[in-house]
Amino acid sequence: MSLGYAEKLSYREDVGTVGMPEIFETPELVQNKIEELAAMVQKSKHLVVFTGAGISTSSGIPDFRGPMGVWTLQRAGKGIPNASLPFHHAVPSLTHMALVELERAGFLKFVISQNVDSLHLRSGFPREKLAELHGNSFKEICPCCKTEYLRDFEIETIGLKDTPRRCSDKNCGARLKDTVLDWDDALPPEEMNLATEHCRSADLVLCLGTSLQITPACNMPLMSIKNGGRVAIVNLQATPKDKKASLVIHGLVDKVIAGVMSKLSLRIPPYIRTDFVQLTLRHSLKKKCVRWTLRVTSIHGLRAPLPFLQSVKVSFPERPDLKSVVLKEQPFSLQRETSMNKPFFMLLTLNFSDGCSCLSSSIGWPVDFQKRKDSFVRDRALVLRELYSAAQRESCIGQQEILERENLPRAETSIHGIVTNIVRYDTEDEKLAPPKNDLMNHSRSNPAKRHVEGTDCHSSLPKKLKYFLKDKKLNC
């Protein structure tokens, strides 16, 4: 499947140097440099990491400038390369998860990313310590109140255009916009200002998987040098900034970072993904019967897809007179008529798509139209932490918990969190695994546009990222 983002980008002839040869230094040399880099990280007081497409290639996302990169093939007159999996199924790489642990351990103060794949946020890296210079394909923003909405599906547009959704704040309601820049779009000043501030304060800027060609982003790491800091670069290709770096490692980013983590005696945490589903049961009286409709939908509304779900089986274990059915088309919906006086137990088997690491999960739903259940809202952050801990402890997925339930006279709605994926990172396996590609190595130029050469830019980050369950806010 081609990356929607790459397909939506405007065509540009001058994209800098592409198709550069990849350099693989000897294992012995790489190991020596890993030890040197680990010592640099250990001594640093203000470490900033600057990431490009190379940290996502092992996640199956193609790059821009590698031998089979988007722009490399474009210049050769060929089409956009295929990703090894749909964009929304990509999981954070070993490097993404290592950065999470480096931040938790107190080494890493800030990450500046040129990528739009949302893998930093998906990994659990704190939003307030992340600048996404080129936006996020899974994030929308309200242009009025500046609230950010992180979705589990790829936003339909790029170029800061209006999307089909509106801000959920009752006092606002403005049309949301996508956050991904096209070539001529201005860089977000909030992201740039904070990134600039951290680069100037850094005693070490570690550049991972970026060709450092597009300005102004490529000049940001050098700001640390002006204030006595150092720059280290890990990339398979040579970069224009190599001569100014204190250390350059030509090797696989995952292998290098795995080695650094080992030297620092830090464990790389597993990636555990939680998805959300909304269940709605509406009913109306029809003589002595009840006509009811079950819907299994995204928390973002009927039209929003559920990328992790392939089908839903609805069965009635205690009622052989009610036939089971498999719902295969989204939005998943089932209509039935049953007796008002006969309660029943409905079992929903959620069959996951190929991107998940288990087949299914089940949700039981006791239905009694003569009794009204209580509404409640649980502490979502606490519930999600418990789900995460359980998945990590039991080394399995499919666990689910109800987050909230709302009961109305003719409808019942519940929202559930479900662990749909868990990935563990074996550092031994990562040592010399070849890369797949290098995608989001783009950048932009001064007061705001992407160029292949240019000057610096500056800037204060949006407040907090909001993960939205239904229309209620969840601070993560």
Image (spheres, rainbow, N blue to C red):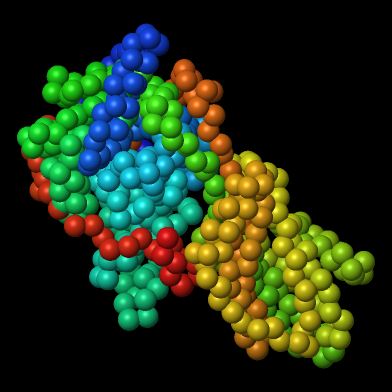
Residue 78 % position (x, y): 37, 23
Residue at 54 percent of width and 49 percent of height: 273
Residue that sits furthest to the right in the current view: 320
Q: Is residue 309 left or right of residue 456?
A: right
The image shows residue 233, relative to residue 289, as above or below, that is above
- Quarter of the rendering containing residue 319: bottom right
The image shows residue 372, relative to residue 327, as above or below, that is below
Residue at 49 percent of width and 24 percent of height: 430
Q: Nearer the viewer, residue 157 or 406?
A: 406
The image shows residue 422, relative to residue 469, as above or below, that is above
Q: Quadrant of the C terminus?
A: bottom left
Q: How many marks?
A: 0
Residue 267 % position (x, y): 48, 36
Q: Nearer the viewer, residue 328 or 421?
A: 421
Can the viewer see residue 55 in this picture?
A: yes
Residue at 29 percent of width and 21 percent of height: 36
Residue at 61 percent of width and 64 percent of height: 416
Residue that sits furthest to the bottom in the current view: 287
The image shows residue 168, relative to residue 112, as above or below, that is below
Can the viewer see residue 236 in this picture?
A: no
Residue 248 % position (x, y): 25, 20
- Quarter of the rendering containing residue 276: bottom right
Residue 88 % position (x, y): 49, 45
Q: Is residue 253 left or right of residue 183?
A: right
Q: Nearer the viewer, residue 170 or 332?
A: 170
